Image: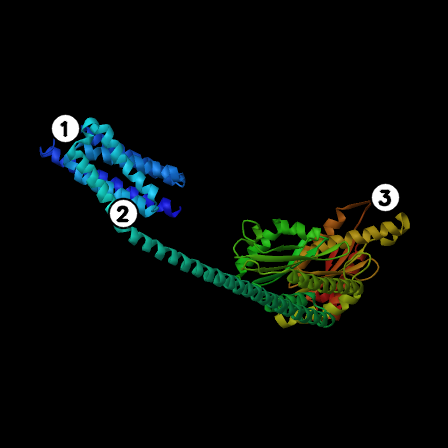
């Protein structure tokens, strides 16, 4: 809003208040019976107030910047006041004072001779219209002349003041312009300082990023060096994965580090987790991972980095406050080995360099898992029979003395059984060696199922001979278990390449401490009992005894 509009709005509000005060003054006098017949006066005052309200509306809309419109409104106000001066003598003095006040307002806004002339026209015009033939009467002329004289005198009294005021105002404007110029220069300098500060801040951020990247690179090198050194020295994959989780937790500062190893053979997961959370929370995580989309990510070899994670987005995060997570798959070629998952409670914790680090770690861990699996395969080749996939005689010779010594130390029983497939040579001669191989694999599979129930061991002892170990089981109980196993073999009919055959086996059972007290006696007595079964017609279970041992 410009100066003219602002000051005129102030003057108009003052004039409205004066008109309202006159209305209140007249109303009070009317009620006291001092004044009568004031109807026209009220109408004129209301009309004046409405004109000024309309002017305020024009000011708010920005229309008063046109000079002629401003003078038109001022003339209307003076016409209203002039009418009050001539219409009712009892308020002519008050109206004259208001008239002079409005004239002063016009002069203060723009002191020009033409404005002075315009300010006198309303009172002269109303005098001509209202007084008509009385206009030239002596008392009217005296009143008009007095008002005009007072206005002119007031103008000339104020003229020097107004000129001096305008001169001071111009000087103030000049000083304000100079100050504005200085402020503008200061503002420009301030902007330069702000820009410089922003540039320094950007450089600081760049340096921070560089330092962070350097620290991350050092962390990468350390982790990779440590993992590489341990891969060569640690054959136990479980121990290695635990160590990797510890290093990621310590160096990356995460809340939880999980290495999840995936077994494609049985679609199972093996967890290695280091976390600040309780075991209950970790168990909940393990349960939910299997049913979550993360399981599919493991299979699809997809990398995830989310710096705005939450329970709403990932069901497997339930029970933990996680703001950021990184999940990198462990895979080589088309084979999937699992996933590395790191979590932190803060948002925006991980960067691209973090992902690069986990990729590098995942390659090392993948190599370690692959090496461990190859090592396990080599061990299996060394200790397991290639045809039946159960343990071989070499493994049996190594493990049996250990188990017997353990049983003695713990004062626990241990039972062994040797059995032989009946008429196995006839199977080979009648149906061929491939069918004979199926017989061996079927019997070995049944035996493996049986010993798994009792934490036992089955091994291929010779061509068609098998050896069973049942730890912590007394002889009489073991005899019952072996009898059930014999019946299962007897009741099974093998179908292979259109050929059918029934299988039977002869068993001998011996145990510590009931019959034997060392490995050699266990094997000998069990073998003797087996041959007794063969001599008695085969497809039998014979239990060794002290009498048989003496014979």
Is there any visible trace of residue 524 in the rendered image? Answer: no
The one nearer the camera, 94 or 536, is 94
Q: Secondary structure at mark 3?
A: loop
Which quadrant of the view contains residue 462? bottom right
Q: Residues within 10 Å of mark 2 (few under 14, many from 20)?
A: some
Question: Would you say 150 lies left or right of 397 here?
Answer: left
Quadrant for the C terminus, please. Answer: bottom right
Circles 2, 3 touching at the beta carbon (< 8 Å): no
Q: Residue at x 70, y 71 (%)?
A: 225
Q: How many marks?
A: 3
Q: Which residue is mark 3?
A: 497
The answer to whether residue 544 is above or below residue 425 is below
The dot on residue 155 is 2
Q: CA distance from mark 2 to mark 1?
A: 36 Å
Q: Nearer the viewer, mark 2 or mark 3?
A: 2
Which quadrant of the view contains residue 369? bottom right
Is there any visible trace of residue 142 in the rendered image? Answer: yes
The dot on residue 37 is 1
Q: CA distance from mark 3 to mark 1?
A: 133 Å
Q: Secondary structure at mark 2?
A: helix
Where is residue 302 shown, x and y percent of the image?
69, 53
Where is residue 243 shown, x and y percent of the image?
64, 68
Q: Residues within 10 Å of mark 1 (few under 14, many from 20)?
A: few
Q: Nearer the viewer, mark 3 or mark 1?
A: 1
Which quadrant of the view contains residue 351? bottom right
């Amino acid at each position: 809003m410009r100066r003219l509009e602002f000051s005129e709005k102030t003057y108009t509000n003052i004039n409205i208040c004066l008109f309202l005060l006159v209305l209140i003054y007249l109303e009070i006098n009317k009620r006291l019976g001092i004044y009568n017949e004031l109807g026209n006066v009220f109408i004129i005052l209301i009309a004046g107030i409405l004109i000024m309200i309309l002017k305020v509306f024009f000011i708010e809309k920005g229309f008063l910047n046109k000079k002629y419109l401003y003078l038109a409104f001022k003339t209307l106000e003076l016409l209203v006041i002039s009418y009050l001066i001539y219409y009712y003598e009892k308020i002519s003095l008050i109206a004259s004072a208001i008239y002079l006040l409005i004239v002063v307002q016009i002069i203060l806004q723009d002191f020009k001779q033409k404005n002075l002339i315009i300010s006198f026209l309303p009172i002269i015009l109303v005098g001509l219209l209202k007084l008509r033939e009385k206009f030239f009467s002596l008392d009217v002329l005296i009143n008009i002349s007095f008002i005009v004289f007072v206005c002119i005198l007031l103008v000339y009294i104020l003229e020097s003041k107004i000129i001096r005021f305008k001169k001071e105002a111009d000087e103030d404007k000049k000083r304000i312009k100079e100050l504005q110029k200085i402020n503008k220069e200061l503002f420009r300098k301030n902007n330069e300082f702000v820009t410089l500060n922003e540039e320094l801040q950007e450089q600081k951020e760049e340096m921070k990023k560089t330092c962070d990247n350097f620290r991350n690179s050092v962390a990468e090198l350390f982790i990779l060096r440590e993992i590489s050194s341990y891969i060569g020295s640690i054959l136990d994959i479980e121990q290695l994965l635990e160590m990797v989780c510890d290093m990621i937790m310590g160096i990356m500062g995460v809340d939880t580090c999980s290495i999840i190893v995936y077994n494609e053979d049985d679609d199972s997961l093996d967890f290695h987790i280091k976390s600040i959370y309780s075991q209950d929370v970790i168990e909940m995580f393990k349960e939910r991972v299997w049913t979550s989309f993360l399981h599919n990510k493991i299979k699809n070899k997809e990398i995830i980095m989310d710096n705005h994670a939450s329970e709403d987005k990932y069901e497997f995060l339930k029970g933990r406050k996680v703001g950021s997570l990184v999940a990198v798959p462990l895979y080589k070629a088309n084979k999937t080995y699992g996933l590395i998952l790191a979590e932190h409670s803060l948002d925006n914790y991980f960067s691209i360099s973090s992902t690069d680090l986990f990729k590098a770690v995942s390659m090392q861990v993948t190599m370690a898992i692959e090496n461990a699996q190859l090592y396990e395969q080599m061990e299996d080749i060394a200790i397991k029979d290639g045809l039946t996939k159960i343990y071989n005689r070499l493994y049996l010779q190594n493990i049996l003395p250990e188990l017997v010594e353990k049983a003695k130390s713990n004062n626990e029983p241990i039972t062994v059984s040797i059995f032989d497939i009946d008429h196995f040579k006839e199977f080979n001669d009648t149906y061929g060696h491939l069918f004979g191989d199926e017989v061996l694999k079927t019997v070995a599979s049944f035996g493996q199922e049986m010993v798994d129930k009792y934490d036992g061991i089955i091994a291929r002892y010779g061509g068609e001979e098998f050896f069973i170990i049942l730890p912590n089981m007394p002889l009489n109980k073991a005899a019952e278990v072996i009898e059930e196993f014999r019946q299962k073999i007897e009741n099974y009919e093998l179908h292979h390449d259109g050929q059918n055959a029934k299988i039977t086996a002869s068993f001998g059972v011996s145990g510590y401490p009931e019959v034997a007290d060392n490995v050699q006696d266990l094997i000998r007595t069990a073998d003797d009992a087996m041959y007794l079964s063969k001599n008695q017609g085969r497809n039998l279970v014979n239990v060794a005894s002290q009498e048989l041992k003496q014979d």
